[in-house]
Amino acid sequence: MGTGRYSVLLRLFELINKTSEDQQLSLLKYLLKGNLTSPVLKLIIDMPHEEQAALLVQLKEMSSDQQPEKTITLDERESPRKSCSLTVDYQTQDNDHSEHILDIGTGGVFIETTEPIAVGQELTLNFAFPDSQDTIKVDGEIVWRNTKGIGVKFIDINQKQIDKIKTYIAVEKKG
């Protein structure tokens, strides 16, 4: 094998390919959480083979330290949810998104999305209820995901926002 940049990159990919599929998925999830930019990738490509191998070992250890994604049942939720269809704008570390909330409760929401957003990532949500001028802006954390979307738990939601959600749910149940 040569000693150029591409042979170093090829060796790194070979090392990754030798790991198990579960380890590769964990590594990918870890990498997706971070803000990897081209300068970081350039540093990895320019590393000597031994340093790349050491980095791979460290990344494997980090991915094995992560807790597995948790699936919760409807009975385990801290607050009841109401089905809905509300437009939500939300920001992650790198991007702005516009999707739909499909259910809501005082503890969080389910957002329909196919975006590859990792469990554990924090985001800021902005949404409003029909016939309301007030926008709710709240931080959240992705606590689970599936092929249809993400489950977001609210972080530091204030009482006024909780009351608005309770009112919306109560009005919707009557209607």
Image: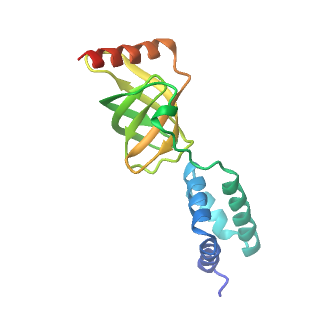
Residue pictured at 46% horizontal, 38% vertical? 151
Residue 13: percent from left, percent from top: 59, 73
Residue located at (37% from left, 26% from top): 127
User: Number of marks in the image?
Assistant: 0
Q: Where does the image place residue 133, in percent across and percent down from the top left? A: 31, 15
Q: Residue furthest left?
A: 175
Q: Residue furthest front?
A: 75
On screen, residue 67 above or below 10:
above
Residue 147: x percent and y percent?
40, 51
Q: In what quadrant of the picture does the N terminus appear?
A: bottom right
Which quadrant, please, contains the C terminus?
Answer: top left
Of residues 66 and 135, the one nearer the viewer is: 66
Q: At 73% from the left edge and 73% from the top edge, which residue is drawn?
A: 48
Left or right of 54 on screen, residue 134: left
Report the front residue among 31 and 105.
Answer: 105
Q: Is residue 113 above or below residue 91?
A: below
Q: Nearer the viewer, residue 154 or 34?
A: 154
Q: Is residue 114 left or right of residue 60?
A: left
Kindly indicate the quadrant of the structure image that contains residue 28.
Answer: bottom right
Q: Quadrant of residue 61?
A: bottom right
Find residue 72 and report its horizontal and vertical position in percent. 51, 40
Q: At 63% from the left edge and 75% from the top edge, which residue is drawn? A: 18
141 vs 16, left or right, is left
Q: Residue furthest bottom?
A: 1
Q: Nearer the viewer, residue 19 or 175?
A: 175
